[in-house]
């Protein structure tokens, strides 16, 4: 059976071509699927359990997609809702959905799939030897994790769809799961379902016009056909096959719950200048495992930024921060009683090696150098206090004892900024499950349209 | 000659929080052949300061792409990380002199 999946864009919150979306709806898709996030922006979203994208952008795009769903009369699914897919961001997305249902006058059945993992469950699985590390895995420590999620696969999305939901708001899923779920349950080729899902998960990134967003994939018994819906976009065998490289450490294998996709035998054929047909990808069943993601607070940060424009200091910026660090380390010890094991203090030279640090192998003659001081301490109060202590020296410290006190450029007042918690990724592991739903929870609710009085 | 001057594009990006992947796109088969031969895995491992045995390399003839994946020199978002998305790592390879 052919299954037609409409993917409006690679992520909710980045925009899409509305005309292309309308064209997609007119082509009568069987389902509309969009991703809500990933780990790509770092551990903060997962650690804090909040969306990276603004509520306003999310709501305005979700409004368009909810209207498209009503017109198409098919389910709308979002995976990894609210950037990180914690239970809190699923609830945030649900709240937006309920608001919009009221505003749009829609009556809906909504399924929420929760991917959050109680620490006790993870601890029990660990004890039972049901957790395996991936490479490279941090040492597993469960006592101080703020959030743990498991990445749902196709089975959990299928369970959510089986409730008859108009809208599925899923917590953390793999990038591909929402797209692969329906084709798999309708008996389309498993290799094609996962491969087509991977190609479409970033929206039009697999086409010649990456920012246009909207993509349609037709899945069937032997493979899939992909077509971009913006007039200015085309899919070519090269643009489609090259997408397997993107954010993938292995471009031929993709691990999912319950097996992996192998595209070494895939053949990409241009059907016309815009559409590509793909066949020959294989699905290799394996143990049913779900990947875990977790984050913890690794400290609290305060930053300070000074700009060196004086040529003498620009030339000697590294020597200056070395001498400054030595001086400050002893000041912090004398005045606050803290040794270097208690906190972190790092100065980064923007204009010298700000992006690459020790890996940088070029040197130049910059006009100015930004000195970014980053303090990491055990509490925000302590980080802020260190920031205040070092502030006058970052402004005035001389390169040698026999020169007058310099004064550098602080771009704002106060010169220090409290950044809040620093989160770190704490897991790169998989958990074995006997039943795919054993680590996931479904909630179904009916939202009635309010009749205006 | 610098690698970036020979090829269409060199890009890098995180592949999850623990890996970074670098793709070198060549426009012509001859360039791909040249890059494939002249670019040693040991030189790339040295550039990113990772043990060579942890480096994954894919020479993909149909796409004219040479791809490297390596454990991130520092984990994404850790206190030591300077490049959250890992997209600037490509610059080192772009500027590598190729014999």
Image (tube, coloured by chain):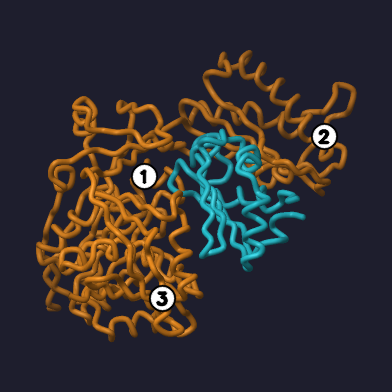
Chain colours: A orange, B cyan
The answer to whether residue A23 is above or below residue A365 is below
Q: For mark 3, what is the residue?
A: A269
Can you tell which quarter of the image residue A127 is in?
A: top left
Are the numbered discs 2 and 3 placed on the same chain, yes or no? yes
Depth check, front residue: A124 or A128: A128
Q: Residue A316 carries which label?
A: 2
Depth check, front residue: B59 or A219: B59
Residue A350 percent location from the top left of the image: 70, 44
Chain bearing tag 2 is A
Label 1 Cα neighbours within 10 Å, binned few <14 / some 14-19 / many ≥20: many
Q: Which residue is drawn at 13% across and 54% down?
A: A443
Q: For mark 1, what is the residue?
A: A46
Please identify the residue farthest to the right as the structure is shown. Answer: A402
Q: Of marks 2 and 3, which one's residue comes earlier in the chain?
A: 3
Question: Does any portion of residue A409 appear in the rendered image?
Answer: no
Residue A179 percent location from the top left of the image: 28, 64
Question: Does any portion of residue A227 appear in the rendered image?
Answer: yes
Q: In this view, does A62 lie to the left or right of B34?
A: left
């Amino acid at each position: 059976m052919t299954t037609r999946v409409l993917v409006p864009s690679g992520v909710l919150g980045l925009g899409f071509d509305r005309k292309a979306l309308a064209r997609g709806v007119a082509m009568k898709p069987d389902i509309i699927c969009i991703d809500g996030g990933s780990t790509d922006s770092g551990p903060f979203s997962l650690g804090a359990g909040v969306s990276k994208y603004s509520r306003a952008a999310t709501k305005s795009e979700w409004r368009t997609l909810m209207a498209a769903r009503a017109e198409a009369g098919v389910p709308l699914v979002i995976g990894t809702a609210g950037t990180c897919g914690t239970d809190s961001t699923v609830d945030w997305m649900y709240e937006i959905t309920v608001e919009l249902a009221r505003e749009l006058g829609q009556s809906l059945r909504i399924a929420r799939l929760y991917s959050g993992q109680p620490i006790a469950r993870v601890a029990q699985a660990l004890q039972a030897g049901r957790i395996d590390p991936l490479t490279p895995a941090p040492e597993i420590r469960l006592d101080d994790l703020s959030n743990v999620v498991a990445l749902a696969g196709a089975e959990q999305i299928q369970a959510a769809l089986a409730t008859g939901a108009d809208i599925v708001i899923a917590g953390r899923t793999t990038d591909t799961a929402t797209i692969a779920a329906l084709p798999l349950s309708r008996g389309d080729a498993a290799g094609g379902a996962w491969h087509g899902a991977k190609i479409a998960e970033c929206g039009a990134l697999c086409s010649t016009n990456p920012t246009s967003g909207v993509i349609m994939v037709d899945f069937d018994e032997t493979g899939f056909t992909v077509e971009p819906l913006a007039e200015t976009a085309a899919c070519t065998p090269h643009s489609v096959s090259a997408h397997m490289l993107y954010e993938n450490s292995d471009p031929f294998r993709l691990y999912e719950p319950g097996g992996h996709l192998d595209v070494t035998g895939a053949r990409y054929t241009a059907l016309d200048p815009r559409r590509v047909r793909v066949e020959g990808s294989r699905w290799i069943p394996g143990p049913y495992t779900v990947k875990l993601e977790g984050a913890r607070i690794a400290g609290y940060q305060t930053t300070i930024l000074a700009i060196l424009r004086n040529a003498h200091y620009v030339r000697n910026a590294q020597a200056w921060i070395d001498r400054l660090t030595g001086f400050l380390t002893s000041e912090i010890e004398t005045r606050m009683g803290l040794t270097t094991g208690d906190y972190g203090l790092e100065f980064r030279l923007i204009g010298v090696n700000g992006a690459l640090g020790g890996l940088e192998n070029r040197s130049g003659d910059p006009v100015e150098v930004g000195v970014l001081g980053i303090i990491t301490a055990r509490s925000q109060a302590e980080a802020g206090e260190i920031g205040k202590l070092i502030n006058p020296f970052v402004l005035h410290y001389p390169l040698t004892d026999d020169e007058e006190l310099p004064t550098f450029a602080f771009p704002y007042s106060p010169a220090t900024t409290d950044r809040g918690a620093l989160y770190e990724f704490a897991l790169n592991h998989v958990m074995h499950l006997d039943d795919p739903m054993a680590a996931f929870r479904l909630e179904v609710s009916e939202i009635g349209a309010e009749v205006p009085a | 000659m610098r690698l970036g001057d020979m090829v269409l594009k060199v890009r890098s990006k995180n592949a999850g929080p623990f890996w970074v992947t670098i793709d070198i796109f060549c426009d012509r088969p001859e360039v791909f052949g040249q890059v494939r031969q002249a670019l040693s895995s040991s030189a790339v491992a040295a550039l990113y300061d990772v043990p060579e045995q942890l480096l994954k390399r894919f020479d993909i003839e149909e796409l004219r792409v040479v791809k490297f994946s390596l454990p991130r020199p520092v984990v994404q978002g850790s206190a030591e990380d300077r490049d959250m998305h890992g997209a600037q790592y490509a610059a080192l390879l772009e500027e590598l002199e190729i014999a």
